[in-house]
Image (cartoon, coloured by chain):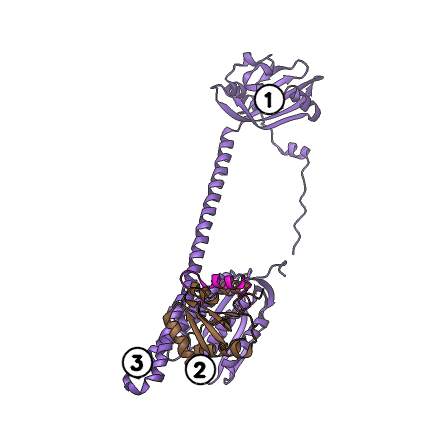
Chain colours: A brown, B purple
Amino acid sequence: MTAEAAHILLAEDDPADVELALSAMQAAGSRQSIVVVNNGEEALDYLHRRRGWKGRGASHPALVLLDLKMPGIGGIEVLRTIKNDVRTRCIPVVIFTSSGERRDVAVCYENGANAYVVKPVEFTSFVETLQAIGHFWTALNVPPTRSVRPQR
Amino acid sequence: MTKAPPVRKSSSKEILRDMPLPPTEEPEISYKRLFETSQDGIFVLDVNTRRIVDVNPGLCLLTGLSRSRLIAADPESIAPLRAMFRNHGSFFEEIKADSVFRRENLSIENRDGVHIQVEVVCNMFHSGGRAFIQCNLRDVTQHRLAEDQVRRLNETLEQRVAARTCELEAANRELEAFTYSVSHDLRAPLRHIMGFVEILEKEAADKLTDAHLRHLFTIGGAARRMAELIEDLLAFSRIGRSEMQKVGVDMLTLVMEALDDLRHETKDRIISWKIQDLPMVTVDRSLMRQALVNLLSNAIKFTSKRSRAVIEIGTEPGRPDEDTIYIRDNGVGFNPRYAQKIFGVFERLNNADEFEGTGIGLANVQRIIRRHGGRVWALGKVDSGATFYLTLPRRGQNDS
């Protein structure tokens, strides 16, 4: 374990959604740290400590909160890459998207998503939802302790 | 059921007896006339000599050969007839074995050197201790051409159906992509409007005038309303796209389940329910339950201002191949002029501030019933209640 607190990686391309998510966390009085990346590529860079994220702490985020519709590498591809890589597949990934389409839900679970949450349209529900997600995955859930580098 | 009277089969003797003969002609003369005037080409072969012993004018016309050229000729030497004898001795072998030789599609050359299709039927008969074969050749070229044409038309029809199906599938996929995009892309800006309105209301309330706060409230309300409309449209679209799983179920059970779903709306109300026995139907359970929830929730909603609400559910006699079910209420009713409009998407016949709802419910009902092969219609008058009718194809004997 490192000294770094449990943190959430939010992969979200829409700046308004990012601001709402941060406001929601603030409104919920959460002290969790949130790292924001704006597209799929950057999310993978963060997890693998590449490019701008070389110097980050060694611990995995307690949760990746992943939007589906992002330019370039989309959410599903990020999910697939995370879950197909022995170094990252244990990181919980929660899909956080506008789409409630059954097809999207099915594809995400087939590719190893740990949960699927539709972004509520109403702000009050949005705040409550993010609060509940943050609480569950960083306080209640016990994640595996594994550093970015593989053990062997 | 009444039994049909037994059919009495006539024997061939009776048929012959019943056929009137021409009064002035002897039977043989009559047959000879048939032979002479037949459109078919006919010739008679002597089995022993294998020579032609008689031909009719029809054959002369067909082959373009004179009677004298044909009589006493070996049929295999007559070019137009050669096709019949092509497979070596098989003609005589076949006719000796079966007493009949039949070919439906034989190609021969007619008198103009044109290939035509003929149907050939040859029969063996005995006369004066000798064996003969009578052959009839019928020109079926026109018939076959017509058949070909029908077959070709069928093929093009199939191609057209396939092409049309392809187009429809493409249109469906496009519609699905559109719905998906509505689902995902229209919700995001609404979330932003509502989110930032709420943040403003919370964090800047003390800096805003009452009028500004009212504007913010209006913006928030409008966005919420639009979110409802989008959700309803998506649900409507899902009804059209979902796969149906039909099962046999008692309509009464479905009504009871729908009423259970509506507990919340009925809990503070006094409603007199009159529910008859309802038929077994073959439906997609969840879709039909949804249709009933929509219809019953309407009846509950539009009787809310009645001191004594009465809602009846029953069946009415209708077409023999379908069940007709009605839901009648004594609520505010509607102007019968708009009886058809009532099933449109987002059509409302009452003021929005008087009764809640987006106006998608009856559009859903119509879509669900139509997908089941049924019909819906409504009867009503302003202030004297409404009756909604739905029909469903009646269950067949084999339905599970």
> How many residues crowd around disc 2 within 10 Å: few (fewer than 14), some, or many (20 or more)?
some
Q: Residues within 10 Å of mark 1 (few under 14, many from 20)?
A: some
Question: What residue sits 71% from the left and 25% below the top?
Answer: B97
| Residue identifier under label 2 | A28
Relative to B213, does residue B28 appear above or below in the rendering? above
Question: Residue B144 at x, y = what percent?
Answer: 51, 32
Residue in view at x 50 percent, y 23 percent: B115
Q: Residue furthest right?
A: B129
Q: Comparing marks 2 and 3, which lies closer to the viewer?
A: 2
Tell me the SS state at disc 3.
Answer: helix
Please say if A36 is above or below B321. Answer: below
In the rendered structure, the answer to whether residue B123 lies left or right of residue B218 reads right
Residue type at numbered disc 3: His
Query: Residues in magenta?
Result: A67-90
Secondary element at tag 2: loop
Q: Identify the mark nearer the N-term, 3 or 1.
A: 1
Q: Is residue A30 above or below residue B121?
A: below
Q: Which residue is mark 3?
A: B215
Q: Does dot 1 land on a helix, a strand or a loop?
A: helix
Q: Is residue B375 visible?
A: no
Residue type at mark 1: give it. Answer: Met
The reply to whether discs 1 and 2 touch (Cβ–Cβ < 8 Å) is no
Which chain letter matches label 1?
A: B
Look at discs 1 and 2 and give the one toward the viewer. Answer: 2
Cα–Cα span, label 2 and label 3 = 26 Å
Which of the two residues, B318 or B392, is positioned nearer the viewer here? B392
Chain ID of residue with mark 2 = A
Residue B181: image quadrant is bottom left
Instruction: Where is residue A150? Give x, y as percent.
Output: 55, 65
- Left or right position of B197 against B100: left
Check chain identity for marks 2 and 3: say if they share one.
no
Whole-number angstrom distance, CA of label 3 to CA of label 1: 97 Å
